[in-house]
């Protein structure tokens, strides 16, 4: 009986963990707009160092953590750059396809001669 229940318990645990991760991501704004994602990143930057210090004190570790590097990264600009590149590539696709087709035909014609 226990052998039949064990795979079900494992599956339920995995589904619970995945569902919790999705819930936390939605609740913190990571799956929202790019502005919400930027705000969530700023909140995480502000919350992580004090939490690490608290845990280090709790476990009795007195090591000094290095300071967090300043990262000048804007998810909004990166997302927009990716969208621009994708749209540009899609708009050039018919022209590129005809160029490559012509090159392929010329190559085949040269081989046949």
Image: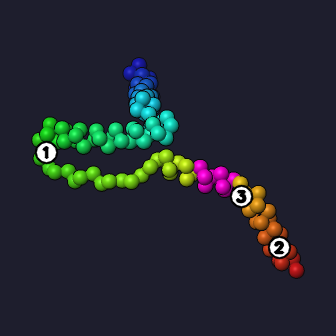
User: What residue sits 14% from the left and 40% below the top?
Assistant: 57
Residues packed near mark 3 inside 10 Å, few (<14), some (14 to 19) or many (20 plus): few
Q: Check contact, mark 1 vs mark 2: CB within 8 A.
A: no
User: What residue sits 50% from the left and 50% below the top?
Assistant: 77
Position of the C terminus by quadrant: bottom right
Task: Please determine whether, in this image, residue 56 is positioned above or below residue 6.
Answer: below
Which of the numbered marks, if any, corresponds to residue 61? 1
From this viewpoint, is residue 100 visible?
Answer: yes
Which of the pair 7/90 is nearer the observer?
A: 90
User: What residue sits 40% from the left and 39% below the top?
Assistant: 39
Magenta segment: 83-90
User: Is 97 colored magenta in this rendering?
Assistant: no
Circle 3 SS class = helix
Residue 49: % across, % down = 24, 43
Q: Which residue is mark 2?
A: 106
Which one is in front in this view, the residue at disc 3 or the one at disc 2? Answer: 3
Q: CA distance from mark 1 to mark 3?
A: 57 Å
Circle 2 SS class = helix
| Of the image marks 3 and 2, the number of the one nearer the N terminus | 3
Residues packed near mark 1 inside 10 Å, few (<14), some (14 to 19) or many (20 plus): few
Residue 28: % across, % down = 40, 32
Which of the pair 58/67 is nearer the observer?
A: 67
| Left-right relation of 113 to 32 | right
From this viewpoint, is residue 14 visible?
Answer: no
Q: Which residue is mark 3?
A: 92
Task: Please determine whether, in this image, residue 12 is positioned above or below residue 81.
Answer: above
């Amino acid at each position: 009986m226990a052998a039949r229940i064990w795979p079900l318990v494992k599956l339920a645990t995995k589904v619970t963990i995945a569902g919790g991760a999705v819930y936390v991501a939605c609740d913190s704004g990571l799956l929202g707009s790019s502005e919400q994602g930027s705000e969530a990143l700023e909140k995480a930057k502000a919350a992580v160092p004090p939490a690490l210090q608290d845990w280090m004190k709790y476990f009795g570790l007195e090591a000094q953590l290095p300071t967090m590097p300043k990262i000048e990264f804007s998810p909004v600009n990166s997302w927009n750059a990716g969208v621009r590149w994708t749209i540009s590539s899609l708009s050039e696709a018919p022209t590129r396809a005809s160029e490559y087709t012509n090159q392929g035909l010329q190559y085949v014609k040269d081989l046949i001669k």
